[in-house]
Structure formats: structure tokens, C-alpha cells
Amino acid sequence: MAEEWQFDVPTTGSKFLPPDARYMEALSSQGYGFEAAIADLVDNSIDAGAKDVVIHFLRDGDALVSLLVIDDGRGMTDEELDVAMTVGGRHHYSPTALGMFGTGLKSASLSHAAAVTVTSRTRKTRPAGRRWVMERAVTGFQCDIVEPRYAQTLIDRYQDCPIIWQGTVIRWDGVKNFPQHGGGGQTDRYLHRTINKLGLHLGLQLHRFLLRDDFNITIAVEDIRSRDVYMNFGVVPLNPFGYPVTGHRDYPRTFVAEVPSIGRVELTAHIWPPKSSLDEYKSVGSVLERQGFYFYRNGRIVQAGGWNNVRQPEPYLSLARVDVDLPADAGDVLRLSVKKEGVEATPEFASAVERAQDASGRAFTEYIADAQLTYREARKRSGTQRKPVIPPGTGFAPAVKESIEEELPILPGEQPIAAQWRKLAGDVFFDIDRDTRTIALNRRYRAAILGGRGGTLNDAPLLKSLMYFLVHDIFETEFSGPRVKDNLQLWQSVLVSAARAELNQLDDESGESG
């Protein structure tokens, strides 16, 4: 006879097992993206009541040396700094706080920097500081105490911008993705690219805060020798529901999902107008990835798109976005990731969404059908005016492929057109390979086109898009007539001259930096 299964495991006591110091390595290896890490620090500033946050890149000539996040929040005392710098140290968050796990400051910072220094001042206390250096942290959780005079100096450096009476400065040193060699304009390119992505990310995740009159985020770059500040601009809110005219007259509309474990969850469903070129729709990632649920926790986006197993993404739902405020107690039904970049939903939530209805009894499934129909009708209107094309394939950025497929009807059953860098003769810029249906680009000019940056499979999206529109219809026939051949010769001549000019300019810049 089988023994009855015992669910309660008997124990004889307990013992204290502190984490190994190497836990800090695990903490800093959670896959934080750069933008998500900075956003986590800004969350702390908001929780501290900050009105102004400055993200400050410091450079010394061509070398980037540090990154700082400064706010005019309430600041911290010595004791509060100890709690803030302790892993898991913040145990008592208010119900409206953006922080919740007590690991964000440490994990986000040490994922991207060899050391993080925090100095802070309250209205009633002098500046104090703590510093985690990764090398020391992993040998015994040794957190350094910042010399008080230096803490005062760092706070004073940002007096009136933005710190007035109190505030906090977080400093990253040894930032891992800073360019190691800044010559040839590499640092400037890095800053332009990184600041643009960071501004878009913060503008989306924190758009509800940025839409307020009393909250601002500024990104700036300063040369520490000349003290010149440039690239100084405010982050613009990107409201993912900020369309001027709805795509469907019956929306937005609020549905209610009755989730047994947590109660009512409101789903405010929106349909974007087709073919929108607004930044709020197209700037942050692929529109295919941005359809679906936008979960907010205390006013901050913690998931921007995705259907959480309610359904799969599809092009016909590219206009569908659903605004959801997470309940104060979501239990295990809607679990937030530590990085605040996703929500894990149980099947209980998916089932409740499928049954959701609005006040008049309209089902959420009807919203899905309306969003699909709005997209299809827009495609039909385009199809009557534009000639079907062979779609782009390998080598084209996903956003480019999506945009072309949105704007143009696609020839069914056709092998897509690829774009590829190849070794070609110096007197040609491109070649048409009908056999493999490929636009071959001359690898000799790749570095010039990319401005010295390293290449990837989907690099040079602007050039490849223009090349696609120049030559895509050539792949629809087996032979090229005299007019097409003359056009090809014309394009070759002009593009080779332009590429050589780019190459010469790159050489000149490299010579000047040397």
C-alpha cells in the first residue's frame, strides 16, 4: 500500500545562511539595458519628490569619463544612505512608490559601471556619501564611506542646477559601454545615438510624469576641462495613446475583466489611426511589438506592448493598444519583473480578458475584430492606388520591413529581396543579383556609410531603404531594357562619387583626430 503523501515537510529548526559576497555579481547580471537602468534611477528621484532630474554625461576631450543622475528630491541622511545602498534594504515603500524590490539602485548601476557613488543632502543634514566598487563588493559586501568634503564638493557642483536646498547625486564610473577610443568622432556618434534612445525610452516610460507642469528630465553633456555644456535638452513625453484623432469612432472604450483572485481590472482599449507617422506611434521600437497591453504601475509604464498570452501579435493588430493600470495588490496574477520591463500574467488573467465586457455588454473580442478591420480597410484603400511589390527580406531592419508592408500591397508567394554587403569592384556601388534576389552593396564603402561604426546584419537602414525603392521593380522581370540599364549606370556613377566623398571625409576626420 502506497504511503499517503505528506504536504507539510517536518523540520527540526533553522540556521542563518547569509549570501556569499559573489551574490553581487549575480545582482549585476540581470540583463538591465542601459536605458532601463537609468530609468530605474529616475524612479528613485521621483519617489524622493524630485521636480527636476538631470542626466549628465561628463567628457574629457574625446573620452567619456562619468555619468551622473542628479535630482532635487528630499535627499538622504547617513542612516538612510546605508539603507539605500544595502541590497534589498528598502523594505517599507509607500503604496504609491515606483520602487518595490530594494535592488534597483545597486543592480542597475553595477550592471553598467565598475563603481557607483551616491552623495546626498537633506534640508537638515550635511552631505554624506557611500560608494560601491565592484571589486570590493564581491569580496565581502564592503561599501565605502565617501569623505565628507568630497560629498560636499559633488553636491555643490550641482547647486542651483538642479539642487536647491536638498538633493542626491548618483555617479557612475567605469561605464562599460562608453567608447574605449573616442577618436574619429566616435564619442560624438555614441552620444547622439545613446542620448536619442535614452530620451525616447524615458519619454515613453515616464510620459505621465513628464506631462505634468512640475516635473522635468534634462539630458546634458559637459566637457570637464572647459566646463562647456552642450547637447542640453529636455526629455519630451511620448504618450502611446497620444493620437489627435481616433482610428475608430467607437474608441477609446473601457472594458472590465473580472479576475477571480484580484477583482476588477479595467482595460481601456484604443485604436490608432492608420498610417500614423507620429513619434508616439512609431519612434519607440517596432509597431508590431508595441501593440497590446500597456501596463502602468503608479503612473509609470512597466510594460509597453504585448498580449501576455491572450493572443499572438499580428500585423492586423498594429493599431490596437490597451491601457491598463495595475491593481494595488495584483498578487501572483500580474507579476512585475525586477527591471520593470514586463508583466508576467497567469492564465487566470488571459481567461478574464477573453470574457471582458464594457458597460453596454460589448465584448473585448469585438474590440479585437474592430482593430483588425480598421487596419484591413486602410490596406484596401492603399491597394487600389499602389502597385504590389516584392517585399524586403534579410538585411533590412524590421521597422523598415514593417513600414513597407504597411504602405504597399505585397506580391504573394515571392522570395523577398535581400540586402547584403559584398566584395565588389571599386568602380561600382551596388550590383543586382537576380539569381539570389539580392541587392549587393560594395563592402569597400561600408565604413564610410556607417561613419566608422561597426556593421550589423540590418545596418544602414536609410541607404538600404532608398536602394530598395530604386531597384525593387527590376527583380520582377528577367531582363532589363535600355532605359533601365541607363538608369543603373546613372545611379552607379552618382553613388560611387558620393561614397568616395564619404570615404575621403572619414579619412580627413581620422587624420585630424590623430
Image (cartoon, helix red, strand yellow):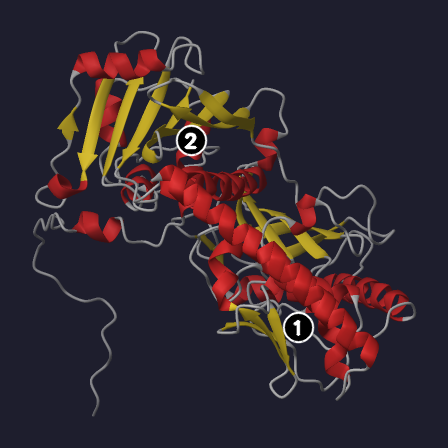
Q: Is residue 229 above or below residue 368?
A: above
The dot on residue 392 is 1
Real-space Cα distance between discs 2 and 1? 50 Å
**Amino acid type of the residue tagged 2 in the rendering:** Ser
Q: Is residue 239 above or below residue 217?
A: below
Q: Secondary structure at mark 2?
A: loop
Relative side of 501 to 103, left or right: right
Q: Residue at x 32, y 11 (%)?
A: 156
* For the residues bearing labels 2 and 1, Cβ distance under 8 angstroms: no
Question: Which residue does the numbered mark 2 point to in the structure image?
Answer: 94
Q: 154 or 502, which lies in front?
A: 502
Relative side of 288 to 513, left or right: right
Q: 508 or 134, which lies in front?
A: 508
Q: Earlier in the sequence, mark 2 or mark 1?
A: 2
Rendered location of residue 425, percent (x, y): 53, 73
Q: Quadrant of the N terminus?
A: bottom left
The dot on residue 208 is none
Q: Secondary structure at mark 1?
A: loop
Q: What crowding class fits label 1: few (fewer than 14 Cα within 10 Å), some (14-19), or many (20 or more)?
A: many
Q: What crowding class fits label 2: few (fewer than 14 Cα within 10 Å), some (14-19), or many (20 or more)?
A: few
User: Closer to the observer: label 2 or label 1?
Assistant: 1
Q: 428 or 11, which lies in front?
A: 428
Q: 59 or 426, which lies in front?
A: 426
Q: Residue at x 62, y 51 (%)?
A: 264
**Amino acid type of the residue tagged 1 in the rendering:** Pro
Dividing the picture into quadrants, the one containing residue 143 is top left
| Number of residue marks | 2
Task: Examine the rendering and report whether any part of residue 262 can be seen.
Answer: no
Relative side of 487 to 110, left or right: right
Dividing the picture into quadrants, the one containing residue 435 is bottom right
